[in-house]
Every structure is written in C-alpha cells, then in structure tokens.
Image (tube, helix red, strand yellow):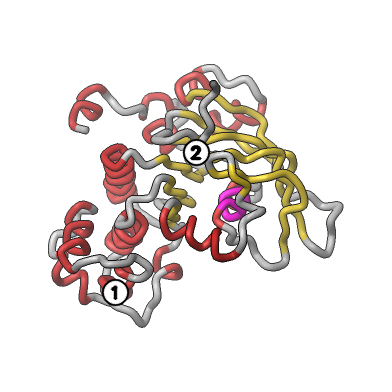
Amino acid sequence: MEKTPLLSVRNLVIGPKRNPDLRLVDDVSFTVDSGERVAIVGESGSGKSLTCFSVMGLLDPTLQVMGGDIRWEGDSVLGMSGAQHRRLLRTEMSMVYQEPLTALNPLMPIGRQIREGVPRVRDADVIRILEQVGMRDPARVVRAMPHELSGGMRQRAMIAMAMIRKPRLLIADEPTTALDVTIEYQVLKLMYDLTHEMDTALLFVTHDLGVVARLADRVIVMYRGEIVEEGETAAVLQTPEHPYTKRLLAASSVATARTLVLTEDEEGER
C-alpha cells in the first residue's frame, strides 16, 4: 500500500476574489513526507509564499483558493471546520516568518509569547527551548521585549515559538532574508538540527539557491505561479532542465550553488 504523504497539495489555484480570471498560483501540486526537507524556490511574485500561506489558512482576505485541495495525512484541510483547523495548527504545524519584528507582539515579553497557545508548558520548557535555539542567557531573553533583541535573536525566538510544541511540519517563509551571512548560516544550521532532532518535516521558502543546497532534500522551482521543475536538490542544481531554473542558477550570488551542499564533516556534527 502506498504511504500517505504528511502534506499533499493537489492542483492548487489561488486568485483575487474580485478577479477570478487572474491566477496567482496555478495548478500547483506537491507532497511533503514525514521528516522530509523541501524547498520552494523562485523570484518574488512567483507564488511560493502564497502557496504556504494557503496551507496555514493565512491568505489575505482579498484572495481565495479557487480550485484544488490541501490534504493533511489524507484529510482535506480546506474542508475542516474552523475549530478543526485551529487544532491542526496548534498541534501539528508551525510557521517561521520572514520578519520576526513584525510577527512578534511588540508589547509582550518573549517568554510569554513562547508559552501562548501551548497547554501545560512549564518555565523549564521555555528555558530549555531557548537554550536549544542557542540563546546565551535564556533567563534574560524570557523577560526581554522584541525590540531589545538583535535580528538574529528575534529569529531564534521565533523558531523557539514554532518548535516548542514539536510540530510535525515547520513552514519557514524566507526566515534569513534580513540577516547577515554569518547569522544566516547559524540560523539555517539551527533549523536543520532541530527539525532533524525532532523528526519535523520542513517546507522552506527562499529565492536563494545556496540556502536550498544547504538545507533541502528536494527542491520545487516556481515561476509565474506554476511549478516548472521539481526533484532531488543535487540533481536539480547540477543538471537543471527548465530554462528558468538555469537562469536562477546563473544569476545566483553563488553561481555554483552546489558547492554549498553540507560537507561530510558538517553532516557528522549533526
């Protein structure tokens, strides 16, 4: 019997409510298995973030899913009641956003934000997850407000919020865009380690092929709302087939993005 994917997106179509003839995401289909790391790559406006927001039920009110389905272990997410979907988000899925300063509540201490929505969480659990994401002084971070932390620390706090409930799927929407190269590598390594340790599947949105090479088992390339290429990361980066994928690789700041694949020594540290 064929194994049911953790997440299955089938023939997804997204468009504006006022202009149903315009398709921002057009006939997109892919799966994510338990523990798998999948990257969606493409330029701004390619539909990659919209696809992920639709999985989380976070589409802008002016947009709608016009066709297709999103399934969680075979059950339609779009057919769930509001209570069922909220339960799924509380227990099975989490998301890390592109800009943590706007995603975090500016009036609430970090510790309280990590605890929100997680039943029966203890103070020791909050400290432990902050230690896991590399916070040097977790006791201080618990009391800190978002503006008191650096960009890298805020992103680590967001990852702590997402991972404290040990989700089965983590969706990350370009979470390293605002970080410098050194902090970016640390955050990527952290996400790689935590998802591997907790056996959490990762759906990672990015425009950076270097990030894809480091992080993903499989890559999906989107262009103008459609998937134009999909496959194992090494195969797509080494022998791209679609002209758009070839242009992405040529235009990458790491023209040879395949050289960024984790080395055996780095893999061994994990």
Image quarter hosting the C terminus: top left
What residue did someone put label 1 on?
112
- Residue 141: x and y in percent read 20, 69
Chief SS of the magenta region: helix
Residue 6 - label: 2
Mark 1 or 2: the one toward you: 2
Residue 261 lies, in percent from the top left, at 36, 27
Quarter of the image that includes the N terminus? top right
Examine the rendering and report whether any part of residue 210 can be seen. Answer: no
Residue ID at (47%, 43%): 204
CA neighbours of label 1 inside 10 A, class few (<14), some (14 to 19), many (20+):
some
- How many badges with numbers are in the image? 2
Residue 267 is left or right of residue 162, and the answer is: left
Q: Residue at x 28, y 71 (%)?
A: 110
Q: Tell me where the magenta segment starts and ends, as one range.
A: 50-55
Q: Name the secondary structure under disc 2.
A: loop
- Residue 250, image x, y percentages: 55, 29
Nearer to the camera, 101 or 86: 86
Vertical order, 269 against 20 (above or below): above
Q: Answer left or right for 51 relative to 122.
A: right
Indicate whether 100 appears above or below 219.
below
